[in-house]
């Protein structure tokens, strides 16, 4: 399932079950690369060597994954997004299109929507880097910027077009510059925490862990 126009570097291993689309570049001189079962890399994407990825990696079109990333199982990263190197990403993370990340820590089940930027340098240009932390089950909605060293807590929510300059506590929503409990987030028949009702796109083996995360989020409520 490797398209004839794809380039596979000699230091890259691609599992026979993987799908590599047209005009992709897989691997580089930066180090070894092992793409395991269930991998799907869509057209024109570049995956450099020297990173580790769990099984079930899914990458959109025109994505760039540079060297030095440590990624768990079933990362899904959208079209035009980039991991610029040095990220540590847990299992079942979802990153939508046109997002960019440097040396961040993104934990299990975090969800990052389109046009978000996660930075590691508060006063560029410099060589002083401090990763931001996007904790388990946290959600960054469209157009967010997370500055270096900030933590977005477990199960928390950041509203659209927000620049996050201070920590967001666990099970907290940051909307319009105001902190509130995530249980205040309601729309139609939906309410937070999202882990109570949303399961789409997660493989069956992830569901017990998602339920466990839901119970952990509930421990932070009622919000003080």
Image (cartoon, rainbow, N blue to C red):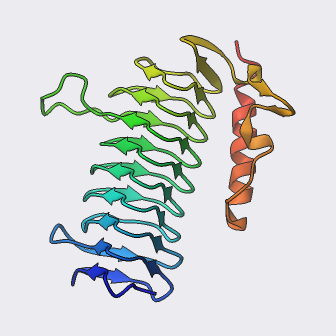
Q: Residue at x 78, y 25 (%)?
A: 186
In the image, 110: left or right of 66?
right
Q: Quadrant of residue 173?
A: top right
Q: Does 28 sit left or right of 221 as displayed?
A: left
Where does residue 34 sit, x and y in percent of width and height?
35, 76
Q: Quadrant of residue 42?
A: bottom left
User: Residue 198 placed where, x, y %?
Assistant: 75, 47
- Residue found at the far right of this picture: 189
Is 1 situated left or right of 49 in this image?
right
Does residue 186 appear to the left or right of 175 in the view shown?
Answer: right
Quadrant where the C terminus is found in the figure: top right
Question: Which residue sits at x=12%, y=29%?
Answer: 126
In the image, 146 versus 6, the foreground residue is 6
Q: Is residue 183 above or below residue 66?
A: above
In which image quadrant can residue 147 be found?
top left
Q: Is residue 69 above or below residue 149?
A: below
Q: Residue at x 44, y 21 (%)?
A: 164
In the displayed structure, 76 sits above or below 188; it is: below
Residue 125 image point, x, y percent: 13, 29
């Amino acid at each position: 399932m490797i398209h004839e126009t794809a380039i596979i570097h000699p230091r890259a291993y691609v599992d026979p079950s993987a799908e590599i689309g047209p005009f992709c570049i897989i691997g580089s001189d930066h180090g070894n690369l092992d793409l395991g079962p269930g991998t799907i890399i869509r057209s024109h994407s570049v995956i450099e060597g020297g990173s580790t990825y769990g099984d079930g990696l899914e990458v959109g079109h025109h994505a760039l994954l540079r060297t030095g990333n440590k990624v768990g199982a079933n990362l899904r990263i959208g079209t035009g997004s980039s991991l610029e190197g040095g990220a540590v990403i847990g299992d079942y993370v979802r990153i939508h299109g046109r997002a960019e990340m440097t040396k961040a820590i993104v934990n299990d089940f975090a969800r990052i929507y389109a046009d978000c930027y996660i930075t590691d340098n508060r006063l560029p240009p410099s060589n002083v880097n401090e990763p931001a932390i996007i904790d388990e089950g946290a959600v960054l909605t469209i157009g967010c910027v997370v500055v270096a060293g900030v933590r977005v807590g477990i199960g928390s929510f950041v509203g659209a077009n927000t620049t996050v300059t201070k920590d967001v506590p666990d099970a907290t929503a940051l909307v319009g510059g105001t902190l509130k409990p995530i249980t205040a987030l309601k729309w139609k028949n939906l309410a937070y925490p999202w882990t109570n009702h949303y399961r789409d796109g997660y493989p069956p083996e992830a569901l017990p862990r998602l339920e466990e995360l839901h119970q952990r989020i509930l421990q932070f409520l009622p919000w003080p």
